[in-house]
Amino acid sequence: MSLDLTFIGTGNAFAAGGLCWNGFLANGRYLFEAPPQALMSLHRVGVDPNTVEAVVLSHHHGDHFLGLPFLLLHWKHQGRRTPVTIVGPPETERLAREVGGTVYPGLFEGEFGIEWRELAAGDSTTVGDLTVEAVAVEHDNRLSLNLGYQAKLEGERFAYTGDTRLCDAVFDLAREADVLVAECASRDIPIPIHMNLVDDIPELHAAMPASARLVLTHVTPDVQTDLARTVVAKDYETYRF
């Protein structure tokens, strides 16, 4: 089997250079993050939003979360007939209902079927062919929890850091993954809650198995690299492993 990662966006919170906010589809059915433009980007890459089986959220910052009301709106009114699973940190359901129900009153009336799965560090869950294990990373301690994920999909192993500084949990993800999707919020700006290309990514890369692949996202346009087995993801592109 192969692992296909389709990026519906690759930018950080500031969307520098017109990059869409970060998020990606795994094998066309499992959406990691719900950036504000998620619904538009799914249409752009030719994916029917009603075929998305699960949304996996790393944390609740707006560039990762605020596309969820639009997805819920589409699912409610545009013909979805099957339940959807939303995976995320504690308080995901409360926040989604609060925000979604405020900006679209009635959004949760007559629900088509939403299964909310809130994970603590060390918890795992399976949706269809995807299994994810939640790993606590170090990002914004004012949020309920910040998660990265170990994942297995149709026999293929990959991991996602979410947003985080370089920390022990990120090295653990790097050592275990065949493919690692990692945030890289800038080229060389030292941001305490993020990783950058110059200071952090070489250390992360060195911790990975010799055959593993590294995909950088949540970037700025000046993030470019010649590190072996590493690609800087681009909006709307699919990468097969």
Image (cartoon, rainbow, N blue to C red):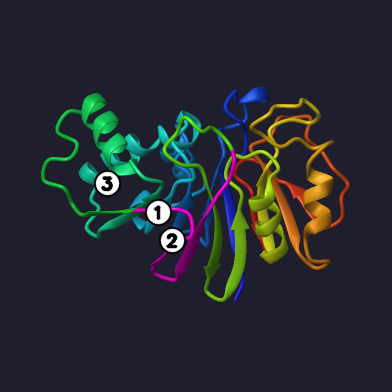
The structure residue drawn at horizontal position 49% and vertical position 45%, both measured from the top left corner, is 58
Across and down, in percent, residue 44 comes to: 50, 42
**Viewer-nearest of labels 3 and 2?**
2
The structure residue drawn at horizontal position 67% and vertical position 58%, both measured from the top left corner, is 172
Across and down, in percent, residue 213 comes to: 75, 60
Q: Quadrant of residue 106?
A: top left
In three-dimensional space, the C-alpha distance between marks 1 and 2, rounded to whole angstroms, equals: 6 Å
Residue corresponding to mark 3: 75
Q: Secondary structure at mark 1?
A: loop
In this view of the protein, which residue sits in the foreground, 53 or 166?
A: 166
Q: Residues within 10 Å of mark 3 (few under 14, many from 20)?
A: many
N-term mark: 3 or 2? 3
Q: Secondary structure at mark 3?
A: helix
Identity, as a three-letter code, of the amino acid under mark 3: Trp
**Where's the N terminus, which quadrant?**
bottom right
The structure residue drawn at horizontal position 79% and vertical position 58%, both measured from the top left corner, is 207
Q: Residues within 10 Å of mark 1 (few under 14, many from 20)?
A: many
Q: Which mark is residue 119?
A: 1
Q: Residue furthest left?
A: 110
**Viewer-nearest of labels 1 and 3?**
1
Across and down, in percent, residue 93 comes to: 29, 43
Q: Decide if residue 150 is on the left or right side of residue 215.
A: left
Q: Which residues are magenta?
A: 118-138
Q: Is residue 52 visible?
A: no
Tell me whether circle 1 and circle 2 mark residues in contact (CB < 8 Å).
Answer: yes
Residue corresponding to mark 2: 123
In three-dimensional space, the C-alpha distance between marks 3 and 2, rounded to whole angstroms, equals: 27 Å
Identity, as a three-letter code, of the amino acid under mark 1: Leu
| 123, above or below 227, in the image | below
Q: Decide if residue 31 is on the left or right side of residue 69.
A: right
In reply to whether residue 199 is colored magenta, the answer given is no
N-term mark: 1 or 3? 3
